[in-house]
Image (cartoon, rainbow, N blue to C red):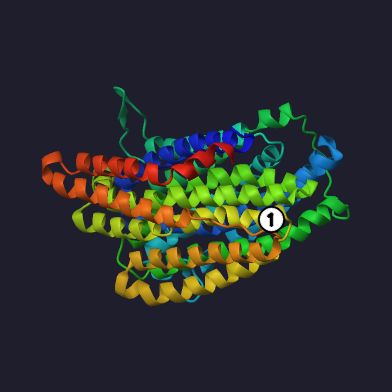
Amino acid sequence: MSRLTRNSLMLAVFLLADKGLAIVRQLIIARQFTFSKELDAFNVANNIPDLLFALISGGALAIAFIPVLTEVLTKQGRDDSWALFSRIANLAFLVTALLAVIVGALADPLVRSPQFGVAPGFTEPQKEVVVSLMRWNLVATLIFSISGLIMAGLQANQHFFLPALAPILYNVGQIFGALVLSPSQGYVILGIRLPALGLGVHGLVYGVILGAVLHLAIQIPGLVRYKFRWIPHLGLNTAPVRQVMRVMGPRLVTMLFVQLTFIWRDHLASYLPTGSVSSLTYGWMIMQVPETVIGTAIGIAILPTLSEMVARGAWDEFKASIERAVRVLVAITIPVAVVLILGLRPLLALAFKLDTGTTDLLLWTSRAFLAGLTGQCLMEIAIRTFYARQEPVPPLITAGINLGVYMLISSLLYQPLGAPGIGLADCLAFTSQALLLLFLLNKRLMSKVTSGGTLLRGLAAGIAAGLAAWLVISLSGERLAGLLGSVAGMALGAVVAVPIVWRELRVLVRL
């Protein structure tokens, strides 16, 4: 296997464990609070803090930072790369602290404003809860302003283990909040009754803060291993810092556009029946399981490699690496999406134990998101190709177009179709953005990235897998208790798809 394949598979394993724990966490929360007004308030309260995290230390700086850090590491050595890291980390922490204070002070109008608030359709008691939870969430955001950058610094050194472990511990902290801090009656696990503090929905946000602390702490040994030395300066006049800022500026606006889609989503859903916000949150989470394990794993692993190729001027290798990744993603995600769309309902019914109407709402919302699985995975690669080249403007322009398309389609669909209409708008908008980015990339490359016959094979695999899954699920009915038939159908669908896309699966080992 190539180094990129090994890193991708390792990340896939850890990301799968992370998503598994995230599902456990969400199931505990869903069963404890159901799809209630309180849970809707908790989900909405995350929006603005998540926006700050994404802008300051999450998606913004990580993707803008790794290519420049990799270039400095490749050309000047580790000491200079850590000096750059220190300056950017100092700046990120100060900016996050300032913005956290501002958001905390303005939390009330940010929630209540009829035009721009995150939840103007909520009841007054719900709005009060959202304001309180939002302010507490800012504490975790401040911790992530450092922890998120440490992930980028270690990945630039081709170290992926501790950054992959950090999100798992973040989930552990949140599970502790859900099991111990929130409930009024302790859960019994392995015959042991856990204590319960009865803090209600606020216990969930305290668990978020604990998870953020664990997320930071687990990565500190990585800094020690790679001999990190902190420098208490900003260095705004140094060339590497200016280079990061040049790439970061457009990236900040890009991430603002992306996060506004989530805020707009919940803004619309606040006018829909109770449970709509939570169905969108959980439907997105369900789609994110295969998207993260497949698309994000390859995307995270490929960015330092692509950045290194750009630094060396190895453009043929650059193009070949992207092409292999695109073909693998298309071949895998189409049949995966199809079998999940067909076989998901019994899994949701067993896991969430909701009433029939709420289960159907979650099912169709999840299906709408899953229809965009291939587009979401291609986005993970397409956007990183431009940042590896330190070209942040094309992602910025396409993100602006994406936001406009998303707002238009979701505004048209959310009333007749409810939450699934908003999910379908997400599918159409982000898939269009991924295709536009790949089109723009080909305009910049001497030799174009092509899918060959992969798209046709992927579609053929999806049709064959879907037919096999549907046949088993339909014939099993109640005789296999629904769930068993669904799992068997999805498994058979996967088996049927493998020979059709075997050529691309072989490419996976030499990404």
Q: Position of residue 198 (x, y in %)?
A: 36, 40
- Residue 163 picture location, percent across and down: 60, 37
Residue at coordinates 39% horizontally, 56% vertically from top-left?
459
Q: Nearer the viewer, residue 451 or 208?
A: 451
Amino acid type at image mark 1: Tyr
Give x and y (percent) for residue 295.
51, 48
- Binning the other alpha carbons within 10 Å of mark 1 as few (below 14), some (14 to 19) or many (20 upward) gives many
Q: Nearer the viewer, residue 159 or 324?
A: 324
Q: Quick check: can you spot residue 286? A: yes
Residue 52 is drawn in which quadrant?
A: bottom right
Q: Is residue 119 shown to the viewer in this render?
A: no
Q: Is residue 193 above or below residue 262?
A: above
Please identify the quarter of the rendering in which residue 149 is found. Answer: top right
Q: Residue at x 51, y 67 (%)?
A: 432
Residue under label 1: 387
Most extreme residue toward the left, as rendered?
A: 479
Q: Which of the image's four quarters has the N terminus?
A: top right
Could you say whether the residue bearing mark 1 is in a helix, strand or loop? helix
> Which residue is at 41% across, 70% downward?
268
Q: Quadrant of the C terminus?
A: top right
Front in this rendered view, residue 191 or 149? 149
